[in-house]
Image (spheres, rainbow, N blue to C red):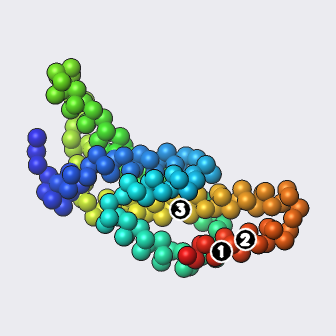
Amino acid sequence: MVHAPPSTIGGSALALHYANVIIVIEKLLRYPHLVGEEARDDLYQMLPTSLRLSLRTNLKSYVKNLAIYDAPLAHDWKDTLDGILRWLAPLAHNMIRWQSERNFEQHQIVKRTNVLLLQTLYFADRGKTETAICELLVGLNYICRYEHQQNALLDCASSFDFEDCMQWQLQCRASFVD
């Protein structure tokens, strides 16, 4: 097998791990209204320290500029994330497929692979890949919070308790700044 430079995902021994992170993000983006705190925490725990630090920095700088979530921005984020995933997700899926085929080869079940290592995340630049993953996570955060806000507003509208609804909005804004 060809050895990748340390500046790559494969050279950092993170190719399979990042492939799993990208696939989880892809799945969460399909149903953002169903993403709860536990799923977000699980995803966060999957991240290496360098990516966690980058994410925290990006979220803090992004959150300071927002007061409330709006539909046009959520739509823009969705388009941006779809664009990133259009090229990044196939690499992640190929990484998983390549690893599976390689495991089968080692057990003498399959003699040749259908996915080339070049078609995976293995030789991807680590910094650029982490930047793309971080952008996916910031966008996912925005979209999920927007969806939860919309669901809560619908609940408020149906409950006729305007005072509780206003209290909830104030709490959301306070937690958004934290």
- Spatial CA span between label 3 and label 2: 18 Å
* Crowd class of label 2 (few under 14; some 14 to 19; many from 20; radius 10 Å): some
Out of 52 and 8, give the one closest to the viewer: 52
Q: Circle 1 sits on which residue?
A: 173
Q: Kindly check if marks 1 and 2 are in contact, taking CB atoms under 8 A apart as contact.
A: yes
Q: Residue at x 60, y 66 (%)?
A: 73
The amino acid at mark 1 is Arg
Q: Is residue 40 visible?
A: yes
Disc 3 target residue: 141
Image coordinates of residue 34 in percent, x first then y, are 61, 49
Which residue is nearer to you in this view: 131 or 161? 161
> Is residue 86 at all visible to an observer of this figure?
no
Give the mark nearer the N terminus: 3 vs 2: 3
Which quarter of the image is occupied by the N terminus? top left
Q: Residue at x 21, y 32 (%)?
A: 102
Badge 1 marks a residue whose secondary structure is helix
Give the amino acid at mark 3: Asn
Q: CA distance from mark 3 to mark 1?
A: 15 Å
Name the front one of labels 3 and 1: 1
Looking at the rendered structure, the secondary structure element under dot 3 is: helix
Residue drawn at (26%, 49%) of the image = 15
Q: Residue furthest left?
A: 2
Does 111 sit left or right of 18 as displayed?
left
| Image position of 142 (left or right of 4) | right
Q: Which mark is residue 91?
A: none
Q: Quadrant of residue 104?
A: top left
Foreground mark, 3 or 2, reads 2
Q: Which residue is mark 2?
A: 169
